[in-house]
Amino acid sequence: MRIFLRISTTPTRLSLYPIRFLTIPSRFERPGPLPLGDPEEQKEFEELVKKQHLVATADDEERLTHPDMRTEPPPEFEGDKNPVTGEIGGPKTDPLVHGDWSYGSKVTDF
């Protein structure tokens, strides 16, 4: 901790006030990292961490999809033309089956 003195001039007197500044230690005063030890053991450890990370990412994808999650309904017809209405380029499934627009469990009422 460093102590600096500030000279204050007031109309009645000249006084010294000690001011303490908390300084941030320089980056060179910090302790260094711990030694890694045997390079072969470090390499083996890094390989095990990489393998575990690859296994964990594969499992995460399976966990993201809930078993009860609804999937999009299958298309009612093949091709671009709806055989019932004759519409070309329209939706493959009727969005108004349940009285609202529902695609992949997302519903928007209008």
Image (cartoon, rainbow, N blue to C red):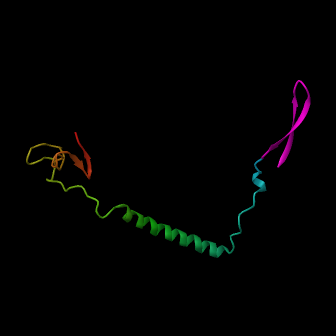
Residue 11's place in the image compared with 7, above or below, is above
- Whole-percent x and y of residue 7? 88, 33
Residue furthest left as drawn:
84
Residue 98's place in the image compared with 11, above or below, is below
> Which quadrant holds residue 9?
top right
In the image, 48: left or right of 31? left
Q: Quadrant of the C terminus?
A: top left
In the image, 21: left or right of 13? left
Query: Residue shown at 50%/70% (left/top)?
Result: 52
Query: Residue shown at 58%/70% (left/top)?
Result: 46
Instruction: Identify the magenta region.
Output: 1-22
Q: Main secondary structure of the magenta part?
A: strand
Does the segment drawn in magenta span residue 15? yes
Residue 74's place in the image compared with 95, above or below, is below
In the image, 94: left or right of 18? left
Residue furthest top as drawn:
11
> Which quadrant holds residue 32?
bottom right
Residue 56's place in the image compared with 7, above or below, is below
Looking at the image, how many numbered discs can be counted on the residues?
Answer: 0
Residue furthest front as drawn:
12
Query: Residue shown at 24%/50% (left/top)?
Result: 103
In the image, 73: left or right of 45? left
Residue sitting nearer the eye, 50 or 15: 15
Residue sitting nearer the eye, 45 or 72: 72
Does the segment drawn in magenta span residue 18? yes
- Whole-percent x and y of residue 69? 29, 60
- Whole-percent x and y of residue 10? 87, 26
Query: Residue shown at 19%/45% (left/top)?
Result: 100
